[in-house]
Image: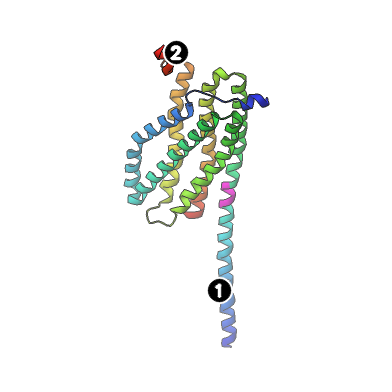
């Protein structure tokens, strides 16, 4: 088991691909959410919503980047990073909210709502595609061969 | 007589201040408990999830891509619980 945990994983990192997909979808949806919250809560609501979306996306990207980076080193390190990364990211989110708590534009209700709705919404949206590709692996695009294989 | 009235006013103000302090401390304790307790469950969940995923990847390295994808989504879903606790915290503390 010790050797197995030290195994490293090579190849493209699926976490970063998933996180990148989520960011692309969030970029599509964000203007609508900002506009809706802006209509309800005013300029402060719109800015708070934008801030919450940025927080959620940064959280996804940081988690994916850390997992992808450590998976190339060893599975044991990836396991440790997943756990401690969770704590560190929670702390960073708290710090990010703490830093803006006294600014004029912070409106707590849209900020909190947007964090939950964006996080869960993007996950469910992504899950539809992931579950489809797991259920029908034949629909996946063929993996790109490495450059050396192309030349030979 | 006026000294007595001053003392009574001072005592009343002190009691009001203490009541306000007590209320604030209770709110802070509640908010802290909401955040702290909400983070425990996801912590256990993520530990279990990642442990099982690493075991699966060690047993079947050829399925590592699929396992990592589902693991990442699982981590994010589990983390949503902690985020809900965090939102409750900020609403209790700041709103």
> Which chain is indicated by disc 1?
B
Magenta stretch prevailing secondary structure:
helix
Q: Mark 1 points at which residue?
A: B13
Magenta segment: B31-35
Residue A64 appears left or right of B40: left
Q: Residue at x 53, y 46 (%)?
A: A91
Q: Is B6 a magenta residue?
A: no
Q: In this view, does A147 lie above or below A120?
A: above
> What x and y, as percent, mark residue A142?
42, 15
Quarter of the figure that contains the N terminus of chain A: top right
> What x and y, as percent, mark residue A127?
46, 27
Of B53 and A37, nearer the camera is: B53
Q: Decide if residue B33 is in sight here.
A: yes
> What x and y, as percent, mark residue B48?
62, 31
Residue B65 appears left or right of A114: right
Of B52 and B64, nearer the camera is: B64
Residue A88 appears left or right of A141: right
Q: Mark 2 points at which residue?
A: A138
């Amino acid at each position: 088991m010790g050797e197995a945990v030290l195994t490293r994983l090579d190849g493209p990192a699926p976490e970063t691909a998933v996180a990148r997909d989520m960011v692309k979808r969030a970029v599509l949806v964000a203007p609508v959410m900002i506009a809706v919250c802006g209509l309800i809560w005013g300029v402060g609501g719109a800015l708070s919503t934008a801030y919450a979306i940025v927080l959620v996306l940064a959280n996804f990207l940081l988690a994916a980047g850390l997992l992808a980076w450590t998976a190339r080193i060893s599975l044991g390190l990836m396991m440790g990073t997943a756990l401690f990364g969770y704590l560190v990211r929670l702390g960073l989110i708290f710090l990010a909210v703490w830093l803006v708590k006294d600014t004029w534009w912070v409106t707590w209700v849209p900020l909190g709502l947007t964090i939950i709705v964006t996080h869960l919404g993007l996950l469910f949206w992504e899950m539809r595609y992931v579950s489809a590709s797991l259920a029908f692996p034949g629909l996946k695009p063929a993996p790109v061969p490495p450059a050396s294989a192309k030349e030979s | 007589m006026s000294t007595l009235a001053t003392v009574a006013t001072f005592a009343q103000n002190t009691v009001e201040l203490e009541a306000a302090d007590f209320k604030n401390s209770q709110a802070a304790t509640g908010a802290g408990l909401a955040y702290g307790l909400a983070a425990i469950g996801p912590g256990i969940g993520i530990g279990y999830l990642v442990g099982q995923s690493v075991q699966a990847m060690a047993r079947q390295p050829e399925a590592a891509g699929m396992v990592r994808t589902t693991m990442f989504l699982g981590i994010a879903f589990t983390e949503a619980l902690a985020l809900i606790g965090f939102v409750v915290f900020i609403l209790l503390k700041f709103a």
